[in-house]
Amino acid sequence: RRRPKKLAMPDPPALPLDVGPMASDARSTSPGAQHAYVQSQSHLLKATSDNPLPTAVPPPIAAVAGLLGVRHVLCLIGLPERGKPFIAQRLSKYLSFFHGAEVKLFDVNEVMDRAGGPPGSDHNAMFMFEEIKAFMNATSSAADRNMTVPRAGSGRSAPASSSSPPSPEVRPVVVREGSAEVQLAESLATHGEEELLVHPSDRRRKNVDSGKVAILFANDTFACFKEKWSGTSKERRRWASETLAKDRALGAKLIFIEVIVDRADILEANLRARERAKNGPTASRESAGPAMYEDELPDECLREFEDRARRFQRIYVSMQEDGSEDDLSYIKLINYGDKVVTNRMHGYLRMRIAQFLSVIHPTPHVIYLTRHGQSTYNQLGKIGGNSPLSPAGEEYARRLGAWVMPYVCYQQAAGLDSLTKTRLWTSSLQRTILTAQHIPHPIISEEDLGTPSVPPEPDADDALANGDSPTRCSAGRSSGLRGTPPRASGLRERLRSGGLSGVVGGVALGGIDLDSDRGGGGDRDRVWQQMAPRVYRNLDEIFAGEYEGMTYEEIKKIAPSEATLRSMDKIGYRYPRGESYLDILARLDPLVHELESYHEPLVIVSHQAVLRLLYCYLTGRTRAQAPKLSMPLHTVIRITYDGWTPPTEERFYLGPECSQTDGQTHL
């Protein structure tokens, strides 16, 4: 048996704090800074002879402006090594990627270094406050353009254009950053400030943007303990709350998020993550030291951590539940979702934050993404539909079924040979279900976890046609597997001997739902069904509406303007009576919450457009990049991330050879 050949992969992208295409700096996320609406609507917002006073900006959609007019300051507090920087980054990515919020991270240590004042001084505190205000008050979008019109009875009216807007297929109209300011200046020159419906300095103009969130955290909680924005005492928290409340024009609400961890396994996971962040994701075991891996943490590392935590705990004051701080908004996150306490958390954004915090955790995630095998519509270049697999797609399904057990369940894709629990998701369309049909679903027990793979039978490597090992690469070719499904002998022997009842929770074992999400306790938690197939309609391909089952050449012939609009704005364009990428974001949001809660490796068999968005979210790319990515057929992408270090990916081409130029490429 040959080990899979590992080829050099390009350096993984650093996990960006910036997920907005026009962010002002490396710690700001501003998807709303570029557009208050999708570009494919631009030509509908111009004055014509029939509509001399058009809507300047259409109503918002959730993915572009899901947090309209909401301004929040989130202050992360707690003892050292609890994962506050990790939470800040995960929250930033989630709120901006799925809700279109503009988010900026403020490292209290870094800002105080730039302030230059003594620790805890008023100078440092006001310097930070001015930084927050500058972010909140910055004009970031064209969202207020509907208010840039003359007041009724002023005696003047907006000039009407007698010409129709340019046809989108002749000259696409793109809304560029700064266009709001240009229009405002023109209106002021024509009408004067006093004659506008809403004055440029009016607070109402600031309540129509996509919502802004400032997240405060400390990389070194000791160094910034005395700073007023550190939130380390009741007095400092009270000062921050009153300072923001006094600035009514700012209109920002303060939420404290206290991270409380007393479980040793979570503390060790945080310490290991810190070591990985220091040494880099590609450091070897020898160069990085055992703290990066599952070996015992060095005594020196543990002593340093215990000493720092003990000294900090003597002077730190936790959020009080005795009534003295009941007027503050806060979340107590205890052991990353084991328990979540909320106080005065009213409103959409606040509840979304509480919900997201309840599912994230600092241990590494391993996600496998793969498209369905080649379908008959792929062969014809058609989009959408619910077509079955082609012969090449059926062969990929067989190869995937044989590959999953050794490389995912036994973790040989990570260079290990140890059985672990695994999960499987597919969409509801038949091409993904058929692709996953050969993946085995054996029942295992806790005693089976950690055991090595069973040596293959003499003919086990004949599962694929060529007999070679799969190749780790971005465009390699290979086939052939090794390893066989686990036998779960420990569980079966106990069943035969009567050590474990043939029923679990009152249900016969053969008909039980072994999905651990159902809970149940007792013997139910001692068994697990590997790769139990779960079907989600949320993972279905983008719906092409009137163009389902057509090729792009056919669409260009019958609707050239629609084809042009889509080419200029793939992420925002919505197929007639169909979907856009932003619609997919809305239905992926609840699935991402579930994905973030998992500790087990997860295999997702889905479609081009859906996987583009998931890939961008998991690897730290912007959502604007998603429509341009290629998700190749018959390839498995393994993504590992923990929120501390840049995500890493490996690609496994399983074959067989097929055309990668199909109708889905243009989705």
Image (spheres, grey):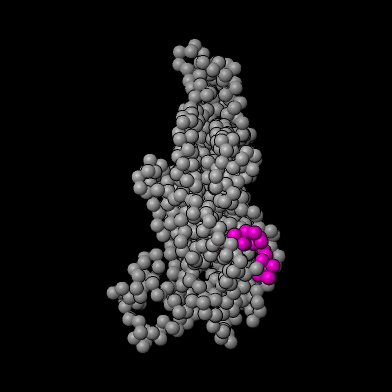
Image: 498 above or below 258: below
Q: Position of residue 522 (x, y in %)?
A: 34, 73
Foreground residue, 247 or 381? 247
Residue 349, quarter of picture: top left
Give the magenta part as a residue range. Answer: 271-288
Q: Position of residue 343 (x, y in %)?
A: 38, 46
Q: Position of residue 118 (x, y in %)?
A: 61, 40
| Magenta span includes 72 | no
Asked whether, in this view, residue 561 is left or right of residue 351, the answer is right
Q: Is residue 485 visible?
A: no
Foreground residue, 133 or 466? 133
Residue sticking out furthest to the top: 155
Residue shown at 49% from the left, 45% from the top: 231
Residue shown at 63% from the left, 79% from the top: 467
Asked whether, in this view, residue 308 is left or right of residue 328, the answer is right
Residue 376, quarter of picture: bottom right
